[in-house]
Amino acid sequence: MSIKPSLGLNLSQNLVITPQLQQAIYLLQLSTLDLQQEIQQALESNPLLELEENEDNTPEPQVDPFDTTASEALKAEQAASQTQEMQDWQDQLPDQLPVDSQWEDVYSNDYSPSSSGTDHDNSLDWFERDTPATSLIDHLLWQLNLTGHNPLDRKIGEALIDSISPEGYLTEDPQVICDALRAQDADFADLSYEEVIAQLKLIQTFDPAGVGARDLRECLLLQLDQLPKDTPWLAAARRLVDQYLEVLASRDYRFLLRRLKLPDEAALQQVIDLVQRLNPRPGSSLSSETAAYIVPDLLVTRTAQGWKVELNPETLPKLRIQPHYAEMIRRADQSDTNQYLKDNFREAQWLIKSLQSRCETLLKVGSKIVEVQQAFLEKGDEYMKPMVLADIAQAIDMHESTVSRATTQKYIHTPRGIFELKYFFSSHVSTSSGGEASSTAIRAMIKKLIAAEPPRKPLSDNKLAELLAQSGIQIARRTVAKYREALNIPPSSERKRLS
């Protein structure tokens, strides 16, 4: 047997992902915040990229960075313009203000921040939103400094405050704090447990009410102690919290009515209402965490022609290639510097095209989702249609993975609120009529049924399944329980109320 070399021609198809395609896929899966960071990095690394910040159509003078004569001329022109503008302002100012006058009496409101028609207080909202919130620890230390105690007592108070959680509870045993102070500082060698408790009692009188408590019972009692003495049912509420808090959690109202010696259920309900108005997490009123705002990628509005989907202009990155660098590339030689500019020019072009592709894909996916879910936009969650990624991918002739990337961490603003695009996709349950019902719609129906249930006899999961079956939706009890838990709704035994 001999092996002879031979030539042959074979045809095959291979999928090759180019760097441009890889970049487009990468940008598509980024959220708005991540995309802004990616663009900022590109602006810092690529000298040919810049943001279009001018809203008017007046072209900026293009100056060759290597032409010093033109650059100096432009600077002189700008300086002259600023000098003329300052002179115009000085001509408008009076030489001397009247003695008993206000700023608004001399100058018009055209230059004031509140001239847009909003109230003066609202004109400072931008400052209030950007001001970091005061933390609970800082708020307590501020109150401690106002007490005017001696330095040793202040150190004990600071040690206690450092052990208070963001919810407002003391997380360390006072005896442990006492032992730690004795071991760390010679001034506290004779520190007693009673002195630590005395400082703790002081802190427990601080704002917010209930702070510094060691458990829920103490927290609620501290808040009740700060209520006016003539508050109706205050004594019964204090006894309820002190002795029967676990019974209240189990909703054994007959036992409570007998033990508290109340005249009727109406009185018991008033006592329970007083306890429920208390805050089990007093520290939550002072949060040091700044709110995270969601900027939607798509905007949905209703017009006379129907629902209109458009990209949010605030999230559209306006990038361009600097014209004078492009002109330099066209007239330059084949040096290393020019090759560097050419490489950055190509990268800038790829980035701009990838961003355009991302916007087109988002708009196409969002428009199709709105087209399918028009009933939800008009009537609510109960009319959400069952839909999976493959449905949208087939409708717009895209791959399912592309639709998945385009809907992850992308948000759409609708008249019903802001939703992640993933929210519109859900599994389905077959109905008795042969149709399909979305799991989102079923959850909305369960929520509606529970909201209308009698307070003394809440609906069990079995009863909810029966009511849904009467509406044509065949669903098991365990599925109802799963949907109810997803809505953070407690079971029927914990939903029982007196009225």
Image: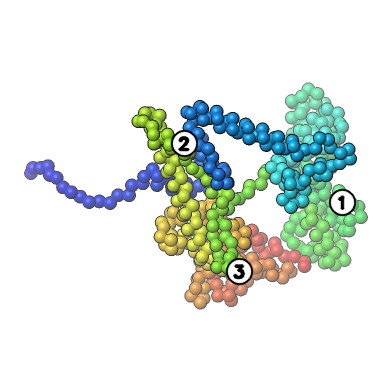
Disc 2, SS: helix
Q: Position of residue 34 (x, y in %)?
A: 53, 44
Where residue 277 appears, as percent x and y from the top left, is 79, 56
> From this viewpoint, is residue 45 visible?
no
Mark 3 or mark 2: which comes first in sequence?
A: 2
Mark 1 to mark 3 CA distance (whole Å): 45 Å
C-alpha gap between disc 2 and disc 1: 72 Å
Residue 227 disc label: 1
- Mark 3–mark 2 CB contact (< 8 Å): no
**Residue at the disc numbered 2:** 324
- Per the rendering, the mark at residue 379 is 3
- Which of the image's four quarters has the C terminus? bottom right
Earlier residue among tags 1 and 3: 1
Q: The residue tagged with tag 1: helix, strand or loop?
A: loop
Q: Residue at x 62, y 62 (%)?
A: 416
Numbered badge on residue 131: none
Q: Residue furthest right?
A: 230
Taking the spot 22% from the left edge, 51% from the top edge, the residue there is 11
Residue 254 location (% of width, % of height): 79, 65
Q: Nearer the viewer, mark 2 or mark 1?
A: 2
**Mark 3 surroundings: few (<14), some (14-19) or many (≥20) residues within 10 A:** few
Three-letter amino acid code at disc 3? Answer: Lys
Q: Nearer the viewer, mark 1 or mark 3?
A: 3
As rendered, which of 339 and 491 lies closer to the eye?
A: 339
**Residue 156 point in image, percent of width and height:** 80, 32
Q: Residues within 10 Å of mark 2 (few under 14, many from 20)?
A: some
Residue occupying image coordinates x 50% and y 61%: 367
Note whether 217 is above or below 429 in the view shown: above
